[in-house]
Image: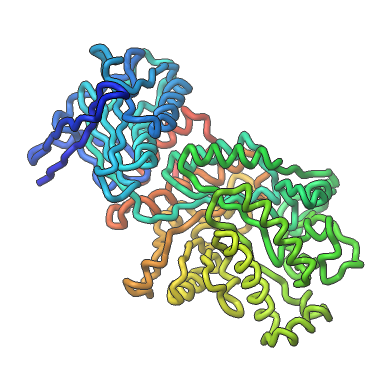
Amino acid sequence: MLFFALLFLVFCSMKKSFLLFALIVLCTGIVQAQLPAIIPQPVELRAGLFPQDKFKIDTHTSILISDNTVKPSAQFLANYIFKYYKLKLKIVNSPEHIKNAQSINLVVNKQMYTNADKYFVSVLKNQLNAGSASPQGIFYAVQTIIQLLPVTAIEQTELMIPSVDIIDYPRFAYRGMHLDVSRHFFDVAFIKKYIDYLALHKLNNFHWHLTDDHGWRIEIKKHPKLTAIGAWRNGTIIGLYPGTGNDGLRYGGYYTQQEVKDVIKYAADRYINVTPEIEMPGHNMAVLAAYPELSTTPKEQKQVAQTWGIFNKFNNVLLPSEQTFSFLEEVLTEVMDLFPSPYIHIGGDECSKIWWKQSAFSQKLIKEKGLKDENGLQSYFIHRVEKFVNGKGKTIIGWDEILDGGLAPNAIVMSWRGEKGGIAAAKQKHKVIMTPENMMYFNHSQFVKDDSLTAAKYLPLKTVYDYEPIPAVLNEAEAKYIWGAQGNLWSEYIANPAKAEYMLFPRLDALSEILWSPKEKKNYTDFQKRLKTQFERYDLMKVNYSKRYLTN
């Protein structure tokens, strides 16, 4: 038996109080019609009380909002419908503006649910109602409404939406996707498009990998050489590492602080948090090209990396000196002032300790601080940076190497070298984001013989879909520290937006279902069926994806 109560607020004007309206109770015996294909799969999706009914959207349809907090979501929906169907809908805040027309009603009522992300959508013949306790819940409802729209036609005079009832909320609090803009730079227009892709899939965290050996991509006013020198390399290897040569072309780019603010605002309007990553203490060839005095070998000639796979081959590690820490604090201060995110990703991965072993200063510091070895020195480095970041009211996130030598007290661990680091961090009662390379690195090939050059590893769609972020070895109390998971898109072999989209889709769809849908509702066969509709939507949106999925 299903008892589904719909709460909806009806209001007369901005000066009048909200009135509680209507409850519709659905009972057993409903004949299930063909249900729409929605990704990620909602918690509850059922045919409406009268499955034969359809809700019509045409030029007379209005979007009715309960208050201005819902307006960005209403505008998002209106923009989507106009862009792809050429139907222009009005946004109104009073039912007095609606004259015998069908309306899409978006309502926030704080007392509706205790879960701010939870929402309902109920499609009736004359109304489409969506409600939540928060504006972000309404935004997720809008993403679902978009997936109820037709996928095959543009410039229709009317759109018909099936009668359905949906109750939905996410499984994990952290639902993330990463983009590396150091190896290859993507302009602001594509970053915004990328954020829209995350929004469509109800992800809520964008991990912006802004710095690495191959280019520094964010303006730092106190250290202008980072972009004047560190944002540009004088060539890039050709083909799969180790390559067949070098193209010899100057390559680079960076985001101004104003552009960063623009991206952050754009993401915030879609309820997506943007977490910047500033790599340390390794992966810093771009920094050392600009400021060689921060290196363990300051007299050696430095350049921004032109080849991939530089681990242990080139000195890319910061000297743990007071000058370096002052530099990092100045950089991080500007970054933290720019980003409202409560989190700063500080990297911490693949720090080649051989450069510290060969450094007299580093060896002396190990003895002075009573550290055991170079792993202890990395722990000292991360602890010191964390203390500074915590002092600014922020929390650090780091790749699982930050466990080496002892985990910083408040750090969040992003587990990429399998699940071992995440398991260890969870047992130490630290938040964990699971992103194991073999399941979550979308730069790996989708097929044994892919259509274009990729990293030389294989990650098929089903492997992504079948991933379970909570390791079975964790008990119930420990499992609560698995905050969520994240997909990563490293850009060594991704030089343009079309290739980024090709590598992203449809593995992003699989990721969204891992992170949003109930574990017990996951079904790969059903997911494949729903993907067929999603591919039609991508065709409508002109999103690039591998057509091989249509035949495989």
303 vs 48: above or below: below
Residue 281 image position (x, y, % from top left): 70, 67
How is colour applied across the structure in the image?
A: rainbow
What residue is drawn where x is 55% and y is 59%?
393
Q: In the shown orientation, is residue 322 left or right of residue 13?
A: right
Residue 94 image position (x, y, % from top left): 30, 21
Quadrant where the image shows the C terminus:
top left
Residue 188 image position (x, y, % from top left): 64, 37
Residue 293 image position (x, y, % from top left): 86, 65
Q: How many marks?
A: 0
Q: Quadrant of residue 112?
A: top left
Q: In the shown orientation, is residue 20 left or right of residue 460?
A: left
Q: In the shown orientation, is residue 271 left or right of residue 137?
A: right
Does residue 269 appear in the picture of this structure? yes
What residue is drawn where x is 48% and y is 30%?
539
Does residue 454 appear in the picture of this structure? no
What residue is drawn where x is 46% and y is 76%?
428
What residue is drawn where x is 77% and y is 44%?
252
Q: Quadrant of residue 352?
A: bottom right
